[in-house]
Amino acid sequence: QKIRKNQKTLKFLSSMKIVLNPEYKFLQQFVQDLPTRFASEGKVIQDKRNTIKVFEYKELEINVKRYRVPIFINRIAYTFFRKSKACRAYNNAFEVIKRGFETPESIAYIEEFKGGLLHYSYISLQCPYRREIREYYQGPLQGNEALMTAFAQFTAALHEKGVCHEDYSPGNVLIAQIDGQYHFSLVDINRMTFKPMNLEEG
C-alpha cells in the first residue's frame, strides 16, 4: 500500500497533458517532443516575463510561448479552479476566428507538472505580420490618418461582435498593409471575454 501511495505521488509530481488541434495532427510528434527540445532549440523572439520561441518544422513557422511558472497561489487556482493561460489562449483563438477576426491559428497547448510546479505552453502558427500598433502609440497622427481610422474601425468591429481583449496593449495588435488595405491580428489572447458590449463598455 505504501508503494502504491508513492507511485501516485510520483505521477502527480511529474505528469503532462497535451491538447492538440485535430487540423494539426501531423505535428503530434513535434508537440510531444517540445518539453525536452524547448530549452535548446528554436529562435528566441521574446524572453521577458514569458519566453517565446519560433520553430521551423515541415515548412511551417511555429510560435511556442512558454509561460513563467505561476506563483504558489496561482498554481493552486490553475490546478483546481481555473483554466491555465495556455488553455484559454488555445480556445480563445478559435472563437476570435469564428467571429471573423485574425489571430494565429491554435496548434496545441501543453500543461506539465514537474516537481509539483505547473508549467504550461501555448503553440500556434507564427503570425506573418511583423509590425505592432505600438510603433504609432506616440504618433504622429499626420500622415497616418488612414491607419488610425482603420484601427478605430477594427476596434469598434471587435466590440460589436462581442470580442473584449482585456490586454489590448499596443504590443498585442500586429499590423500589415496588403493591397492597400490594413489588416490587424490579435496576439496574447489568454485574457479575453466574449459578451455583448454597449458603446460605453467598448
Image (cartoon, rainbow, N blue to C red):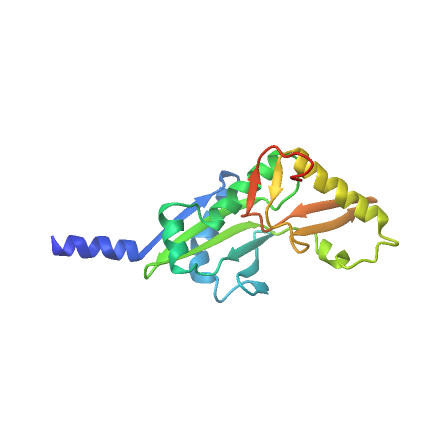
Q: Nearer the viewer, residue 47 or 123?
A: 47
**Residue drawn 25% across and 57% down?**
10
**Residue drawn 84% across and 54% down?**
141
Q: Nearer the viewer, residue 139 or 26?
A: 139
Q: Is residue 186 left or right of residue 181?
A: left
Does the image show residue 132? no
Residue 169 versus residue 195 in the image, above or below: below
Q: Nearer the viewer, residue 127 or 72?
A: 72
Q: Residue furthest left?
A: 1
Does the image show residue 6? yes
Q: Nearer the viewer, residue 93 or 105?
A: 93
**Residue drawn 63% across and 45% down?**
103
For the C terminus, which image quadrant? Answer: top right
Q: How many numbered circles are shown?
A: 0
Q: Residue furthest right?
A: 143
Quadrant for residue 171, please give it: bottom right
Quadrant for residue 54, please give it: bottom right
- Across and down, in percent, residue 24 comes to 52, 43
- Across and down, in percent, residue 147 comes to 81, 48
